[in-house]
Amino acid sequence: MKITVSARNADVSPALRAAAEAKIGRLARLASGLDRAWVHFTEERNPRILEREVCDVSIDGRGRHLRCKATARDGFVAIDKAVEKLEQQLQREKTKVLRRDTGFVTAHRAS
């Protein structure tokens, strides 16, 4: 998967860039066919907003388009939150495909 990391109103340190590439790259194991990912960091300038670091992630591939936005006080925490949201989206999509293709029914829906 090709990962592009960029920023506006914020600096992306080499450690943050490497962490973002590693964590987003691990999502490719959950679903095949994810081709490209964009990770965009911004910083809110409003002093009343405590969680100033914003991480916006978009992923494309094989007819899929996943997107999430996470905020935190630190860029590393923001990328962790974004990866967690994307994992939930991928799991929901995988379950939807399994249910459609094989008639798979989860245990809580069987009753």
Image (cartoon, helix red, strand yellow):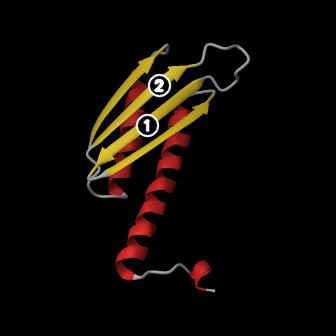
Q: Residue furthest right?
A: 48
- Image quarter where the C terminus lies is bottom right
**Distance (Cα) linking label 2 and label 1:** 9 Å
Seen in the picture, residue 8 relative to 100 is either above or below; the reply is above
Q: Position of residue 26 (x, y in %)?
A: 37, 49
Res. 93 image quadrant? bottom left
> Which residue is the site of mark 1?
57
Determine the secondary structure under disc 1.
strand
Look at 42% across and 20% down and name the residue there. Answer: 7
User: Looking at the rendered structure, which numbered label has been put on residue 41?
Assistant: 2
Q: Circle 2 — which element? A: strand
Please identify the residue farthest to the bottom as the structure is shown: 111
Residue 109: image x %, image y %? 59, 79
- Residue at the spot 50% in from the left edge and 21% down from the top edge: 42
Instruction: Look at 51% across and 55% down and name the residue there.
Output: 88
Q: Badge 2: few (under 14), some or many (20 or more) residues near its Cα, within 10 Å? A: many
Question: Residue at horizontal 47%, vertical 49%?
Answer: 86
Let me know if residue 12 appears in the view. no
Viewer-side residue, 59 vs 18: 59
Give x and y (percent) for residue 28.
Answer: 33, 52
Q: Amino acid at mark 1?
A: Val
Instruction: Give the residue type at disc 2.
Output: Phe
Disc marking residue 44: none
* Neighbourhood count class around disc 1 (C-alpha, 10 Å): few under 14, some 14–19, many 20 upward: many
Q: Is residue 104 left or right of residue 52?
A: left
| Picture mark count | 2
In the rendered structure, which disc, 2 or 1, sits on the residue that comes first in sequence? 2
Q: Would you say 102 lies left or right of 61 here?
A: right
Quick check: can you spot residue 49?
yes
| 72 over 63 or under it: above or below | above
Q: Relative to 102, is 59 above or below?
A: above
Q: Quadrant of the N terminus?
A: top left
